[in-house]
Amino acid sequence: MSDYVEMLAYFGVSSAHPGGIELTKTMLEHIKLTPEARILDAGCGTGQTAAYLGNIGYQVEAIDTHPLMIEKANLRFEREELPIRALQASIEQLPFPDEVFNLLISESVLSFTNLPAALAEIKRVLAPGSQMIANEAVLKAPLTPKELATVRDFYGFHALFSVEDWQEQLKAAGFQDVRILSFDEHMVQEEPTEMELSEYIPPSLYETMQTHYDLIQAHRKHLSHILFECTV
């Protein structure tokens, strides 16, 4: 895993995606779900989104690849007395049967994966007519090869896609009714980022956090996030 992902885990950053939990709530307002809906939070981090969904009554499953994130998510679920148990698993190999979920949520996850493999697994576990919603990184203006390599290496991105690339990848994977909206069109006022700090944080990760902020500032015209909504 990249130092960036390690930093998120040790600092316990609850919403690593722009817009935070408030944007997540806004995204969910556009989805029509029955009270019995089963939802997969694929890349749950510290469990903030999964806990929100559990607290409003949905059946929720949660996965993440980082053991420290899993630990922090499960502590949250226990603290809030929720019947959710986060599992350590990859979105590229989901430990669930076919067609069991009505909604899958991915927040700053897919760019870190082998996208065709991840989309195939998402499609497999979603019931016919079900939806995926995601908040993911997008390349909105070209970077030089050196800049692109720096960004990919630092974050651990498997790939960094333009809006057109995302559309092509989703359609090629068999998703329908693909709706992609720019993040700026859905900006909401976000609360301060919640953190669940580890007792010990390696000093190098403070430098990683600073590098993250420096890269974001340096490439504000090139990097952003977009929201997807699509159907199986």
Image: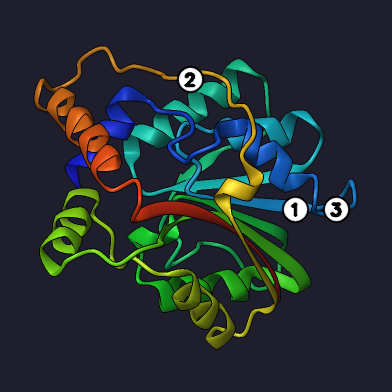
Q: Where does the image place residue 10, in percent across and percent down from the top left?
A: 28, 26
Q: Where does the image place residue 22, in percent across and percent down from the top left?
A: 65, 31
Q: Quadrant of residue 111?
A: bottom left
**Residue extending furthest top?**
199
User: Along the polypeptide, which appears first: circle 2 or circle 3?
Assistant: 3
* Residue 218: image tag: none
106 shown above or below 66: below
Disc 3, SS? loop
Residues at circles 3 and 1 in contact by the CB criterion of under 8 Å: no
In this rendering, position of residue 185 left or right of residue 149: right
Amino acid type of disc 2? Glu
* Residue 38: image tag: 1
Q: Quadrant of residue 196?
A: top left
Residue shown at 19% from the left, 28% from the top: 210
Res 156 visible: yes
Q: CA distance from mark 1 to mark 2?
A: 26 Å
Q: Quadrant of residue 49?
A: top right
Task: Identify the residue position indicated by label 2 in the image.
Answer: 194
Amino acid type of disc 1? Arg
